[in-house]
Image (cartoon, rainbow, N blue to C red):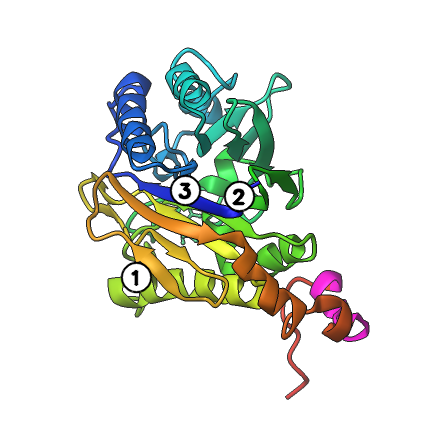
Amino acid sequence: MPRVLRIAAAQQGPNLENDSRQVIVARLLEMMKQAKADNCDLVVFTETALTTFFPRFYADDRAEMDPWFERDMPNDATRPLFDFASENKIGFSLGYAELTPEGRHFNTQILVDKDAKIVGKYRKVHLPGHAEYEDRRAFQHLEKRYFEPGDLGFPVWRTMGGVMGMCICNDRRWPETYRVMGLQGVELVMLGYNTPSLNGLGGTDTPEIRMHHNHLSMQAGAYQNATWVVGVAKAGEEAPGYHLMGGSCIVDPDGRIVARAETEDDELVIHDCDLDTCKFLKQSTFDFAAHRRTEHYGPIVEQTGATPPPE
Ligand code: CDV
């Protein structure tokens, strides 16, 4: 099995509110075709790739949001991606809003192998934002209203010659996300993000500092767990006053950005990722079995908020 995977991060320009699934999937398919023409093994699409980022909309009745969700995967709209994958032997990872037969709502990412088989499913654990309408915000971020936290943990899968895992957007900011996968020997973490260029609450964040946070989180996660990380944006103005950052990138196990998007549009960011380059740090600085001191890590799982010492 070759250990060099040619990976395309398929950044997307904005999905507008009225764009149909068919129009959006045609764009994704075009990027898959370009990736195949460039001999890629795997294409990574973003979070909620099939729709606009609807958690910016408020509805009293959350069922009004159900049309943004997929009840089956593949379905009629996404089947062209699966057909292309199996006919051309190319894998992909795709983010979408999932509505289960039991009526549960998740922010989901799947991993599809070169025979178009869904080999992995991840459901977003860290849901940012809020559950009720908040007047003080320039725009809403209602993920806590429309999704429940993922119930699958952070699994990894041995597929396409490597050990692969996924997370979604806000998950990338939490070291625990990468470490749980690192403890399973992950060699490639794939993630998509919809990240506004400004904080809806105002504050001192500039678009530049937010881009810095974006890359810093992924670079740290990659280095500290000796894994490749592929981060894929949905970028640009999805609505007036609602601008999403780009900056899609591929990060090597040393934490270096080795390829990066230059636009805020549909754009492939391609790199030959040698999974064997994970080995050196996994066997030295980050040889977890040799160096971790779990007897001191209790608070990480025992408490959520910080408890500073008394004044
Ligand atoms: N889709 C996201 O999870 N977005 C968050 C925003 C709200 C900060 C993120 O962490 O990028």
Q: Nearer the viewer, mark 2 or mark 3?
A: 2
Q: Is residue 206 left or right of residue 146?
A: left
Badge 3 amino acid: Tyr
Along the line of sight, which residue is nearer the eye, 305 or 288? Answer: 288
In the image, is residue 299 part of the stretch drawn in magenta?
A: yes
- Residue at 64% x, 46% y is 154
Q: Is residue 151 left or right of residue 99?
A: right
Badge 1 amino acid: Gly
Q: Earlier in the sequence, mark 2 or mark 1?
A: 2
- Residue at 50% x, 62% y is 253
Residue 98 against residue 193 in the figure, above or below: above
Q: Is residue 8 left or right of residue 72?
A: left
Is the residue marked by circle 1 packed among few (<14), some (14-19), or many (20+) residues within 10 Å? few
Q: Nearer the viewer, mark 2 or mark 1?
A: 2
- The secondary structure making up most of the magenta span is helix
Label 3: element kind:
loop
- Residue at 52% x, 49% y is 189
Which stretch did the figure color magenta? 294-302
Label 2: element kind:
loop
- Residue at 63% x, 75% y is 285
Q: Which mark is residue 2?
A: 2
Label 1 sits on residue: 202
